[in-house]
Image (cartoon, coloured by chain):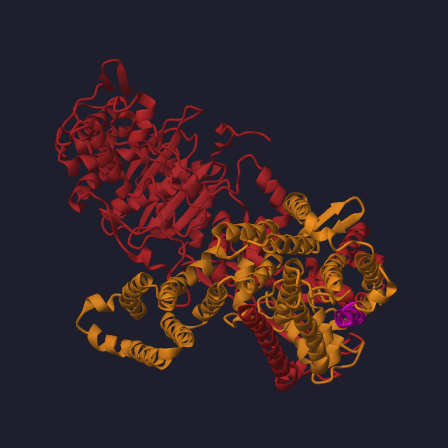
Chain colours: A red, B orange
Amino acid sequence: MAISRDRRSALITMMVVAFIVIAIRLFSVQILDKQYRITAENNALKYTTRYPARGRIIDRNGEILVGNKLTYDIMVTPIDVREFDTLELCRIFDLDTSIVKEKFREYRTYRTKIGYQTLTFKKQVSNEQYNMFIEKAFMFPGFTGMPRTSRTYPFNAGGNLLGYISEVDADYIKKHPEYRSGDYAGKTGMEEAYEKLLRGEKGYTIYLRDSRNRIMEPYANGEYDKLAVPGTDVVTTIDAHLQAYGEQLMKNKVGSLVAIEPSTGEVLTMVSSPGINVEQLAEISKYYRDIVTDPYKPMFNRAVMSPQPPGSVFKLVNGLIGLQEGVLTPQTQYPCHRGYVIGNLRVGCHNHSSPLNMYQSIMMSCNAYYCYVFRSIIDNPKYGSVREAFNKWKAYTESFGFGKKLGTDIPSEQAGTMPTAERYDKLHGKNRWKSISIISLSIGQGEIGCTPMHIANFAATLANRGYYYIPHIQKDTPEAPINSSFKERHYTMVDTSYFTEVVKGMYMAINGEAGATARIAKIPGVIACGKTGTAQNPHGDDHSVFICFAPMDNPRIAVAAYVENGGFGATWAAPIASLLVEKYLNGKIAPERAYLEQRVTEGNLMYKVKVKKR
Amino acid sequence: MQPATYRKLDWVLIGTYLFLVLFGWMNIYSSSSMDSGSLLDFKTKYGMHLIWIASSFLIATLIITVISPKLYSSISWPFYFVMALLLLAVAFVGVEVNGSKSWLEIGPIRFQPAEFSKISTSLLLAYIMSKYDFSFKSKRDVIKVVLVLLIPMVFILLEKETGSALVYMGFLLVFFREGMSGWVLGLGAICILLFIITLLLPTLTTMLIFIGILAAIWAFYAKHNGVLVLFFAGLLILLLAFAPRLYETLSDGSMFIAKYPVEIWVAAITIPLALFFAIRAYMRGNKTIRNVMAGYILGVAMIFSVQFIFDNILQDHQRARIEVLLGIRDDPMGVGYNVHQSLIAIGSGGLFGKGYLNGTQTRFNFVPEQSTDFIFCTVGEEWGFIGAIVVLAAYLVMLIRLINSAEKQNDRFTRIFGYCVASCLFMHVLINISMTIGLMPVIGIPLPFLSYGGSSLWAFTILLFIYIRMDLEKRK
């Protein structure tokens, strides 16, 4: 019994102590602390949110891509609402009476939750409507106007890149509890990626309310108010003029165009076509349905989200690996008579002189040559098995960034695909595949998927002769410094000296004599290097691919163009990429190339693209 | 039963009950009477609550006069089983009312099983623990009661009603009374304390405080050498406190030491030592040292895992509420809105309050969930410190009366049930009031007898009156 008596006392003591703690806290809150003391006359405080101006998005040369303009949101505090003329309100804001009724039914249902809170009644009303409302505001107790900023797009470029903002919904708030209903947040593109910088910090003004609920003056002369902190401007690496020009070139074609400054990894241009028009961004809610139902999927950022086989561009990768592995020298010659034939396998090729050395093979884009190179890599006796050699080859390609996310700051970046030994085991049986079985990898076909960003990054790697910086769209500024990973060089597993050799072949592809595949990309006054690609497409016309960089020494721009159903690389992708380079380096298009510019801008390939109609 | 026996009812308990219920209604009237005038109202809460009160009185009368107190022990198993099923049903087909998915709708009736399962759990615990051979030394018995406790808790957690589940921890107090080791309660308390301190202070500081607490406990238990323990603990704390200095001097040359923060070193040195002493104490059968050392190891593990638990296991809103409570984050317009408004309401009450029906903060609905979970705000604002203390005192009177009365019972079933009632009541009052005055994170549970709502009032009425009726058996 003694123990139980002890325990009873212990429990009672515990309860008494807990109650004493509560009593002490009550004493301090109710009697000691003046902070909560509000006198009977001015008893209630009303918090009004002050919204910050969202940060602007500025291009690399100071052009404003996304700015702000003043609009008004009409707010309602349901508990303050008295009877009002519904028809008049509907007339001012051009609303349907049933909508207003529906809203008020909702306020009624959730009245305990709403309490004294103020809600958004109508978003972004025009200046004209706002002025009409202000004149008659006395008729609508409980309604107020709240100055907000909405986005403007002074420069007609970069719809997909910039992204849009919209009001946060319940789902979003659940994931980001710091947001309140009525706040806006970036949902795609840079608006999403840099939301934390752009959004700024909300503030509030405190007003006094009398016992009849009328708002009096600011509390304590605004001493306890919190000012809104405007969002930070984000400077992008994009060149607005070049972006606009790129979009013009890609108009009415499906594909992407990416330009990178090789010496920094800064993305100069990123076009995904067809894309979202900036005019639609400002009023995204109005166009949203059209955009998502568009069969060409304008919301889809092909530049980082659409992995495709790279085609002949990939021969350069195999050439580099061959050189590094010692199974190929620039002087190695292989014959080609319209293709590579072994057993009943045949990889076709076009008509060109034979035999070829490595430089010529790049210049003329010979398929057979790279079948030989690829087989000598995979069948290299140095490795015990095809599997081992293949894994080594795969490690090389990964060091170029293929088959993995590059780690850019662009939302929804895709990793693309590189085949694995396991995949071939499944296709052909365990270890029952040989270099012949996977020969299509030699010319960038088969199980490879690279996004245009991967290909552009490869172009930049070639321009740098062996390393790349992770492509990024935010420019380093003191207010918003970029991730340090964007400032590191990433070397491939291939020695930089071999790049010089491959680049010579790329020089010849544009500037070479008869047989050079990319002569159309020759720019007056600029020495450019490039490589065409034609990605086989079982569903329609082949895809046209081209990479290039210029000038050859100290390159300032590296470009990848991917035009779906565009046919040969030289037909569409090479002109588009070279025009972009010319515009960037020369500032204008030479008269003798004006016809090319006209052909490209007027060209329409949309009819070739098969889309699913909904 | 003769009418004369009713005079022997515990009128102190009934009196405080009546006071709290009626006072509660007054405050609900105050906080909801403004609604009727406004544009957004069609049915009043105070009217509804009057119906709940009347029906509660009816139920209480039935329990006292009609239902035989011998019934309860025999129905404890089936009743518990039915309630568990209902709780499970809520988790899947529950109806959402005011953001809480804890409601069950059967025809026109709508209620919260979580409120009533406190009764069934109390009855079953009383039934099991009142068996003559029940003992906390038997593993089988411990597992049994822990399961009885855990099943409703888990089901309620499935409904995402963390607060209501937390209340069940109160039954540990009953376990304690019936012979569970005090170490379990102590450990729980220390865990909560460590969790809070770790979030607020640097890890090393937390460890020092923890060592201090442990030393004090040790000294308390091992009375004969308490001074010595405190002396050595003080020495250890001093040494550890100076470790950063020592570390600075050492770290100039040696990269190995500088690579890891001081707290890692302290843990790396003290944990093996503690382990050694714990094992030695275990061999020699010295329970105090064994427990202290084991407690130290567990505590340090806890300190190092708090950040992980906080970042990865808690949900966003729970994390935010805790951050607001601890002052890590200040967000009067957002997560902290309720507590901020609640504190303004209570704080503005002052010593005597603003007077009945004069509380502006509460009457104008500044505090969300005013009449349910935050009813104490109205008390604090309109009746001031005095009113709040009177309510607290009423609860304390009820609690002490319950415990003392339970302790005097000859029937174990009645005694344990009495402790269950007291524990439930205590947890609700503690959590609810602490939440309104910013001592605990916002956990939405009602204040017994005062809050608006039928389920809660009915459940607590039934709990209390079953006990009062059982108690009458002894007094007859």
The secondary structure making up most of the magenta span is: helix
Q: Is residue A73 visible?
A: yes
Instruction: Please tell me whether residue A313 is drawn above or below residue A299 in the rendered image.
Output: above
Most foreground residue, A517 or B185: B185
Magenta stretch? Answer: B9-26
Most foreground residue, A566 or A167: A167
**Where, by quadrant of the figure, is residue B302 drawn?**
bottom left
Query: Where does the image place residue B332, in percent across and percent down from the top left?
Result: 60, 71
Q: Is residue A153 visible?
A: no
Query: Where does the image place residue A488, in percent across and percent down from the top left?
Result: 28, 56
Q: Quadrant of the N terminus of chain A?
A: bottom right
Most foreground residue, A599 or A386: A386
In screen coordinates, is B295 left or right of B259? right
Q: Residue at x 75, y 78 (%)?
A: B382
Q: Is residue B205 magenta?
A: no
**Where, by quadrant of the figure, is residue A104 drawn?**
bottom right
Query: Where does the image place residue B325, in percent across and percent down from the top left?
Result: 55, 70
